[in-house]
Amino acid sequence: MNLSDLQFSPGAFLAPSVDWLNTNLHPLFAAISYVVETVLSAIEAALLFVPPYALIAIVVVLAFFAVGLRAAILAGLCLGFCLLVGLWTASMQTLALVTVAVVISVLIAFPIGVLCSRYKALEAAVRPVLDVMQTVPPWVYLIPAVMIFSLGRVPAIIATIVYGIPPMLRLTTLAFNQVPKVFIELGSAIGAPPRSILWKIEMPLAKQTLLVGLNQCILLSLAMVVLAGLVGAGGLGAEVTRGLTRMEMGLGLRAGLAIVAVALLLDRLTRGLFDRGRLAKAR
């Protein structure tokens, strides 16, 4: 027996499964692609319909009233940088992709995280799956996504969602596990239904850790932007890829700094909204 006979190839087992999915569930995948493309196109169209300077002014004003002066200044600087380096359209495409990916990741991870905090058996079963999801190199997610959805923005956003779910799910579970049991028991003692206990008692107490999970989800989704450019997703990732393939350091650096600007904008706005809400409740 040769050593080659003992080799194990996961692809030999997974490829037939992917072929079966493409053959039998093609209408489902086509519907998913249509919905994702429609939502992304609508968000991009809304962001690009408004002139850049007007959109920057709107975001600055909203950030000032919703968060504060420092957040408004930062928002203006971040968006202004994206405009001045000539990557406004690509930045808006990236912002739309990240927004959709983060929203879907949170919608999937939050309820599963709450259930994991309630049922320890489920948490034990989910934990190794999350370990694998966070250990596997992120570009590996693009391979099955491209095989099922072909090239474009859909496989990019699917891979981004898969990459963004684990931190949000882990920190959601941690957030609700850290809620003091005495508050839950108090809610039960006064006759509050489970839904009220969740939203009115546990959520406020877990909000700080949930915010950390949201920020991690946003930052990891932006980390996938560059890899998404490899499969034709467009946006800033495509500009970084173009700079790499053409050996244009200036283009790659500008696109990389624009990604940093978008990350700072989303991170500071979400953190500022949370801090503003917490201070308002404290008063």
Image: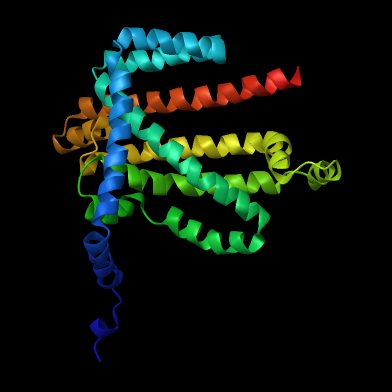
Query: In this rendering, would 10 be left or right of 210?
Result: left
Query: In this rendering, would 111 be left or right of 181?
Result: left
- In this view, the residue in front, 77 or 11, is 11
How many numbered discs? 0
- In this view, the residue in front, 200 or 232, is 200
- In this view, the residue in front, 149 or 271, is 149
Residue 87, given in percent of the width and then of the height, sits at 25, 21
Residue 283, given in percent of the width and then of the height, sits at 76, 16
Q: Residue at x 58, y 49 (%)?
A: 113
Q: Which residue extends farthest left?
A: 246
Q: Quadrant of residue 220?
A: top left
Q: Residue at x 21, y 29 (%)?
A: 249
Q: Quadrant of residue 126?
A: bottom right
Q: Quadrant of residue 196?
A: top right
Residue 4, given in percent of the width and then of the height, sits at 24, 82
Query: In this rendering, would 80 be left or right of 200?
Result: left
Can residue 233 be seen here? The reply is: yes
Q: Is residue 75 above or below residue 166?
A: above
- In this view, the residue in front, 136 or 273, is 273
User: The N terminus lies in which quarter of the figure?
Assistant: bottom left
Query: In this rendering, would 89 be left or right of 196?
Result: left
Can residue 68 be seen here? The reply is: no
Q: Is residue 156 above or below residue 281?
A: below
Q: Residue at x 49, y 46 (%)?
A: 108
Residue 239, given in percent of the width and then of the height, sits at 22, 31
Q: Which residue extends farthest bottom?
A: 1
Q: Is residue 72 above or below residue 132?
A: above
What's the coloring here? rainbow
